[in-house]
Amino acid sequence: MGSESYQLLSKIATNDQHGENSPYFDGWKAYERNPFHPTKNPHGVIQMGLAENQLCFDLIEEWIKNNSKASICTLEGMHKFREIANFQDYHGLPEFTSAMAKFMSKVRGGRVRFDPNRILMSGGATGANEMIMFCLADPGDAFLVPTPYYPGFVRDLCWRTKVQLIPVHCDSSNNFKITREALEVAYSKAKKDKMNVKATVFSSPTYVSVSEVIQEMKCNLDLIHIIYSLSKDLGFPGFRVGIVYSYNDQVVNCGRKMSSFGLVSSQTQHMLASMLCDEKFVDKFLLESSRRLSKRHEKFTKGLEEVKISRFPSNAGLFCWMNLKSLLKEETIEEELKLWHVIINEVKLNVSPGSSFNCFEVGWFRVCFANIDDETVEVALKRIRVFIGKETKKKVEQVKRWQPNLRLSFTSRRFDENVLSPHNHIILSPHSPLVRAT
């Protein structure tokens, strides 16, 4: 019966290309099975694998209390109910697309303007990513993606579209910058494998929007498309507001038709249009959000520094990359995943291993700090301190065990000229506890 049911399903429904068989998503499942709560489950898993900004919900809630007419589900806003409930234009509410264009400009410091007529709606960044793939690529086409990259790209960009991702390997030697050489290596490999490369997906460590760059250089605007959502800047992933902004008229026209599969609800558009048009609120929110993120970043990274955990240079954001390479017995993905299992199952922190982001340099872990409250951050840092303390103690004990053995091996042998000859060395592996302890 099970086999017959399976045969009823399509290949898209049953294939394993959704990308969710990854440590990144396994960490989420571990959290869902045993979620931390300060009183109900104080020994549960703390969610530090979620890159969301939950530090300013109080500001949002205050605005909602003071602007009840923005919702069609209140007495003050009910007069708009029929109009909003019946709205289904693919273009979106004019006041919403206009407000989104202004907000996108504001979060970029007002350095660039966006045309509301080029805004395409979708169900979150996930839907927006897939929409642009359907517009640009045929099954089998390839996209170059610099590493490390979001594990969900496999699902968003490839699962249903059958597009392929080609990693462009970047490393910490130059702070994971994208180089021409790395792009050319990945491109050459793709061509050698007879893949049709359609584009490069990228983000910049120091945020500079491509919409700013194109104002200062000559380029083919028809080849530039931007994906945006309100999940990070406002902390609204549940609202499923994804945007494709394209400079290409054909893509805008095609994407408009495809947006019918994932439109943002008219009720959500209506409420957000009111909020984002409130310039006084938006200015206050962005300023305070930046301040709180910076403060949280400083608090968490100082906690890492206190236990000698190095990290990738950063100054704010929703997460940081911490380097735990010194805790690996060997520099392999297998050892990285073993360490990750310890952190998930024993330390009870859901952090994400770099290998799940296609980072080929082992030992890096992404840890998010903006989705939990101050008290939970303290608990997480305490767990990290205890864990690092135990690991450091293990290393010291390993060194102590080695030292007597080394003294015994020397004293039990004749120190003649043959033993001390230049042709007889004691060779220590770079992974030896003695080498790592120096």
Image (spheres, grey):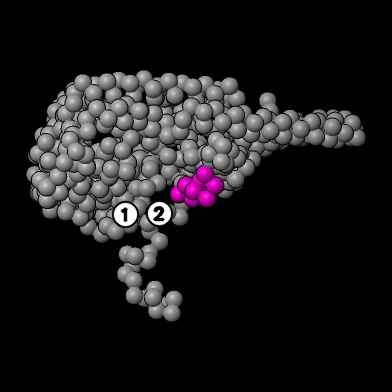
Q: Quadrant of the C terminus?
A: top right
Density class for disc 2 (Cα within 10 Å; few <14, some 14-19, many ≥20) is some
Q: Quadrant of residue 206?
A: top left
Q: Which residue is mark 1?
A: 158
- Does the magenta portion include 274? no
* Rendering coords of residue 300 (x, y %): 49, 25
Mark earlier in primary sequence (2, 1):
2
Label 1 element class:
helix
Looking at the image, residue 336 sits to the left or right of residue 58; the answer is right
Name the foreground residue: 256 vs 146: 256
Looking at the image, residue 353 sits to the left or right of residue 70; the answer is right
For the point 65% across and 37% down, the residue is 431
* Rendering coords of residue 13 (x, y %): 34, 65
Which label number is shown at residue 186?
none
Q: Quadrant of the N terminus?
A: bottom left
* Rendering coords of residue 36 (x, y %): 53, 40
Label 2 element class:
loop
For the point 38% across and 64% down, the residue is 15
Q: How many marks?
A: 2
CA separation, marks 2 and 1?
A: 9 Å
- Does the magenta portion include 34? yes
Look at the image and give the residue range highlighted in magenta: 25-35
Amino acid of disc 1? Cys
Q: Inspect this view and state whether residue 272 appears.
A: yes
Name the foreground residue: 75 vs 344: 75
Disc 2 + disc 1, Cβ < 8 Å:
yes
* Rendering coords of residue 311 (x, y %): 49, 28
For the point 18% across and 26% down, the residue is 278
Which label number is shown at residue 19?
2
Amino acid of disc 2? Gly
Looking at the image, residue 414 sits to the left or right of residue 264; the answer is right
